[in-house]
Amino acid sequence: MKKTKVKVATKVKMTPSEAIVETLVAEGVNHISGILGSAFMDLLDLLPAAGIRFIGVRHEQSAAHMADAYTRVSGVAGVVIGQNGPGITNMVTSVAAANQAHTPMVVISPSAGTPTIGWDGFQECDQVSVFKAITKETVRVTHPSRVADCLRTAFRIAYAERGPVLFDIPRDYFYGEIEDQILAPHQYRVDNRGCGSLEAIDKAVDLLLSAENPVIISGRGIVDSDGIDVVKEIAEHLTTPVAVSYMHNDAFPAYHPLAVGPIGYMGSKAAMNTLKEADVVLALGTRLSVFGTLPCYDIDYFPKSAKIIQVDINPRNIARTHPVEVGIIGDARAAGHEIIKRLKEKAPYRKENQERVRDIIREKEKWEQELETLAMVDGSPINPRRALLELVKAVPEDTIISTDIGNVSSTANAYLKFNKGRQHIAALTFGNTGFAYPSALGAKLANPSSPVLAIIGDGAWGMSLHEVSTAVEENIPVVACVFNNGAWCAEKKNQVDFYNNRFVGADIQNPDFAEVTRSMGAIGVRVDRPEDVGPAIQEAIALNKPVVLDIQVDGTQLAPPFRKDALKMPVRLLPKYAHLDHRNW
């Protein structure tokens, strides 16, 4: 028998910059976001020839928000870069946000050159220490010959642990001559994590079959693994209602008969009233975050005595916030496939529970009627809920929507509906303002054929409007829907409820955002009548250009506070402040 010769890859001469860029190419990276700097100029010079687009933002925080959304939509880890020192530290907020969002990302972090480390030189900062707590790992290049190996390690950990990784490289290590080989991703990382313990899955199946009122919670892991179809199968086989986890409204089709909507702050009362009656909860691809399961609308909906089956790819998340009956460490889609396979083996013929379906329909209809009633209350000039309702009616079904943090952005959680995954890009639990617009840019880069809208309050818009210049320069046609109520209204609501309408720092004096937008080369439109919201959005999408809609909404129509338990009525002990004591109002 003739022996087959195994091809062994041979090392070739290249520069460290070339080794980095070729590794990025092997990883399928087609663009990098950031602001150029002298520290990585040698690498930057290679990008056009490598087919990698460099997208220059106006602030590095925006770069990582773009990469976060790009990854959520495309599934490919985003890559960002900046000048050593301030360029990299400008990304702290957005990298921390991606870390809490479990978004794979690689931060290429040039640092001070090795001959000057420790001398407090120009733009020197210990970036590894700064990022250690907000990344899954910080990988330091210890020698120029290790650049490709260290970058592969960064990608391996980013995908395996679902989060950002810092790739820190002294600026002088981009130069020189090394011998190395470029590996394909399958040679150094594994994407398929499997379904988890089959014994645990069997226990989960038995629990589900014995349940009287099972409920499914579908989360980010289902979206990331493209597992929505398997959730449908399980739900339909068991006639089980499906809620989606906080700010992941795209984790199950909203128009499916068994969908009840999102849990969490400003979620769906239909979901909450359904979930509180559950005796078994199948939590697929969700960590069941503390904030995302808190009471809302005075409904303490997360069941205390239900038996929880939790499936998560990260063992740290199992039972981290709620005790479980069965914990399964595995890919949500793969675990779901095994669950439905065993359900059909043990109970192949299940009649639809028509009474349960009627209950679901009744809860949903009641909630939809409440949402519409709240939206149709007159506002001056526009009730923000009315604007959200008109927005949802106006957008095409394949629209991707990013949401910021704040009063209107959070209220959107109740109104936004999606029929497939990778459409809802929310700020999630880090809760920083200025997220939605750069994220919309990243989402559009990932899926150019879908319309992309950003829902942003005027406060958050002040932190991101500079990126309109990036959208114009790079020709990224997204629509910014700025809900302009002249205040930081999420915090203003606290001052209404707890501080007797004493407003300190809450009100904002805004410029004419439409005019500012036009001066930046984009299309700016002011909207101040509720009936104009839908047509303005449809026209903006049709233009296929960067558009900003300055939507004038009522600043007195406010959502409930984020955390009623987080503040107390003010008590003042010094005579000077006695008039501020709630007992003297």
Image: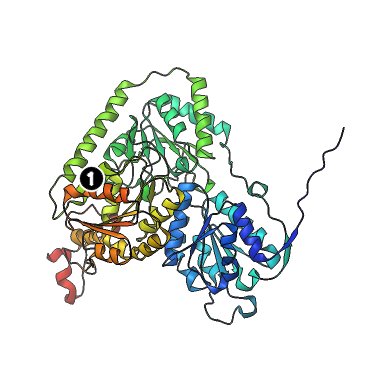
Q: Indicate the quadrant containing the C terminus: top left, top right, bottom left or bottom right.
A: bottom left
Relative horizontal placement of residue 368, taking residue 345 as reference (left or right): left
Q: How is the image coloured?
A: rainbow
Label 1 CA crowd tier, 10 Å (few <14, some 14–19, many 20+): many
Q: Which residue is drawn at 26% across and 53% down?
A: 408
Residue at image point 55% right, 81% down:
120
Asked where in the image residue 473 lies, by quadrant, the reply is: bottom left
Q: In this view, does 213 lie to the left or right of 349?
A: left
Q: Dividing the image into 4 quarters, which one contains the N terminus?
A: top right
Q: Which residue occupies 45% across, 52% down? A: 445
Viewer-proximal residue, 141 or 518?
Answer: 518
- Report x, y in % for residue 89: 48, 69
From the viewer's perspective, tell me whether residue 264 is left or right of residue 193.
left
- Name which quarter of the figure residue 381 lies in: bottom left
Counting labels gives 1
- Give the residue at the far right of this rendering: 1
Can see residue 567? no
Image vertical order of residue 74 relative to residue 129, above or below: above
* Relative vertical location of residue 499 with respect to residue 207 in this rendering, above or below: below
Task: Where is residue 241? Give x, y as percent.
Answer: 35, 31
Give the residue at x 37% y 25%: 239
- SS under mark 1: helix
Residue 293 drawn at (x, y percent): 36, 46
Is 118 situated above or below 322?
Answer: below
Q: Position of residue 452 (x, y in %)?
A: 36, 49
- Can you identify the residue that label 1 sits on? 390
In this view, the residue in front, 511 or 135, is 511
Residue 575 visible in the current orientation: yes
Dividing the picture into quarters, in which one does residue 481 lie? bottom left
- Amino acid type indicated by mark 1: Glu
